[in-house]
Every structure is written in structure tokens, then in C-alpha cells.
Image (cartoon, helix red, strand yellow):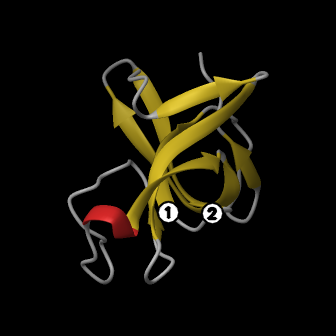
Amino acid sequence: MSETLFSVDKGSVRLLGSHCKLCGHSWFPASFSGCERCGAYGDDLEALSMDARGRVLSLARIPRDDGEFTLARIALRAGPVIRAIATADELSVGDSAEAFVI
């Protein structure tokens, strides 16, 4: 995992994203080339350390030769929607989710 994607503070994972000071939009992963919503750039963008907790929006079971894994779409509390590999067997849409480092 890249240290530019997250940090760990007192055992809690923080996702490293960006925030637009003009329109308030936040996104992950961090990118400072321009706001995804309004196009602002430069000093109008700032780094954002986000809570890595959110709510499951959807789940997809992906088959592989060695079994399967579950891909989840998660709406973070800070706003961005991310995709992540789910580790809980009994995860459902609407459940709370939290990132952790393995």
C-alpha cells in the first residue's frame, strides 16, 4: 500500500484526499491538478485527511480461480465514494464499514 493513500494515527486509518475551498467538494485519492466538480486549482485546493469510515452502498461478489472476493462501494463520511475489498462475510448494503491495514 502506498503511504500517499493513507496514514495511521493511533491505530486509526486516515485516507489522504483533497478538498476544494471554492465549492467544498472532497475526493480520494488526493490530486491537486484541479477540482473534479468546479475545476478550481492551485491555492484553492488543500490536502484532506479523511475518516476512513462510511456506509456500504453496494456489493459485488467477484469469482476467481482460487475462490471469490467481495468488492464494496462505500460512501465515506467526508463525502467521496470509494471501492474497497470487503473482508466481512455477512456484510450488507447499508452497513457501516471501516478501513484497516492488513
Counting from the top left corner in percent of width and height, residue 99 is at 64, 36
- Looking at the image, which residue is at 30% across and 72% down? 36
Q: Nearer the viewer, residue 54 or 72?
A: 54
Q: CA distance from mark 1 to mark 2?
A: 9 Å
- Looking at the image, which residue is at 38% across and 23% down? 2
Q: Nearer the viewer, residue 4 or 97?
A: 4
The correct choice, above or below, for 36 with respect to 81 in the image is below
Counting from the top left corner in percent of width and height, residue 74 is at 57, 57
Q: Tell me which amino acid carries mark 1.
A: Val
- Looking at the image, which residue is at 76% across and 57% down? 95
* Drawn side of residue 94 relative to residue 33, left or right: right
Secondary-structure class at tag 2: loop
* Drawn side of residue 71 relative to residue 42, left or right: right
Report if the CB atoms under discs 1 and 2 are less than 8 Å apart: no
Neighbor class of circle 2 (other Cα within 10 Å; few <14, some 14-19, many 20+) is some
* Drawn side of residue 15 relative to residue 32, left or right: right
The tally of labels here is: 2
Mark number displayed over residue 67: none
* Drawn side of residue 61 relative to residue 10, left or right: left
Give the position of the C terminus as an image quadrant. Answer: top right
Counting from the top left corner in percent of width and height, residue 43 is at 34, 64
The correct choice, above or below, for 1 with respect to 28 in the image is above
Secondary-structure class at tag 1: strand
- Looking at the image, which residue is at 71% across and 48% down? 97
Q: Nearer the viewer, residue 9 or 13?
A: 9
Q: Tell me which amino acid carries mark 2.
A: Ala
Counting from the top left corner in percent of width and height, residue 44 is at 37, 70
Mark number displayed over residue 78: 2
Mark number displayed over residue 81: 1
